[in-house]
Image (cartoon, helix red, strand yellow):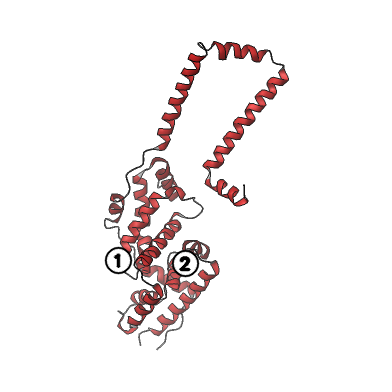
Amino acid sequence: MELSDGQLVARVVVDDDQHAFAELVRRNQSTVRGLLRQLTRTDMALADDLAQETFIRAYKNIRSFRGDARFSTWLYRIAYNCFREDARKRKELVGIDEEHWQAEQDPQTVDPGLRQDLMHALNLLPLPERTAVVLCCQNGLSHNEAARVLDIPLGTVKTNVLRGREKLKRTLAAWAPS
Amino acid sequence: MMKPMIDDETLDRQLRDAAPYIDDGGFTARVLANLPAARRRPSQLRAIILISLTLLGCAIAYLLSGGGRFLVSEGVMELSSFPVWMLFVFAFGCGLVVGAVAVIFAIRKTPEVHDDLARLGF
């Protein structure tokens, strides 16, 4: 019988069972790395470094996981904090970086195909909207869960999701092959 | 030519489909290799300390009481001379003290209750 995330966490806390923690990493690595790739705009090496840091922090602080949220939601929060700290350490002003990145992009050069268009359109969104869309629309978190992960008010999450969705729809419509 | 705008559900489904499953590719192994060394199991250590101290305390009490004469024989004789109501009060008081200590430790060991009490200003 497959153990739930909660049961695996209990094994890590009580017995310091690293095999149980390995199973938790295996189950969640794809979504955590995927989230960080979206946040770092497909910088895979940086995203994987941050994902590794995320899981190591999770292991060190697993006793503070209270079980009132899903384990994956708790991991997303750690991952997002790792990303923010890294951005601060690199002294990159996210707003300026965003504008610079967006100015460099030319939608006409994107590979054809819905998936590429969609991922590219997602990458064009400003960070707050992109993060909210990735968490809520792509990873299925509720607005409440996303607000907890991002440590921002619920209303802000809703606004960012709404704006992000509208921009994606508009961009996708504009990119329709003629 | 512009495509018509898609609805939220379709967009969400397409976003989920567009996110590929990322193969582990040794990622889990790298994380495990970088984990801090396994902590010494505190529950076992605590049990060993508590049992050792309890045995030591029993041995000292036995020796100091002259083979248990003072604590057991004289203590029981002394208690037997108490009136019944006083024995009840004594037992009730002991129960209250032990119960209070147990509740205090239980609260300290339960972060949720501890946080809630702190929030309420206790």
Q: Position of residue A142 (x, y in %)?
A: 50, 64
Question: Which of A163 and B3 lies nearest the eye of the viewer?
Answer: A163
Camera sees residue A4: no
Query: What kind of residue is marked 2?
Result: Cys
Q: Position of residue B91 (x, y in %)?
A: 65, 24
Q: Which residue is mark 2?
A: A136
On the rendered structure, is A98 left or right of B61?
A: left
Look at 33% across and 57% down and name the residue there: A52
Residue situated furthest front in the rendering: B64
Q: Quadrant of residue A45?
A: bottom left
- In the image, residue A159 above or below residue B68: below
Q: Position of residue A84 (x, y in %)?
A: 40, 65
- Local packing at callout 2 (Cα closer than 10 Å; few below 14, some 14-19, many 20+) is many
Q: Secondary structure at mark 1?
A: helix
Question: Which of B107 and A93 lies nearest the eye of the viewer?
Answer: A93
Look at 33% across and 64% down and name the residue there: A47
- In the image, residue A140 above or below residue B114: below
Q: Which residue is mark 1?
A: A44
Look at 52% across and 70% down and name the residue there: A156
Image quadrant in which the N terminus of chain A is located: top left
Question: Disc 1 sits on a residue from what chain?
Answer: A
Look at 58% across and 49% down and name the residue there: B118
On the rendered structure, is B9 left or right of A121?
A: right
Question: Disc 2 sits on a residue from what chain?
Answer: A
The earlier-in-sequence mark between 1 and 2 is: 1
Q: Secondary structure at mark 2?
A: helix
On the rendered structure, is B98 left or right of B29?
A: right
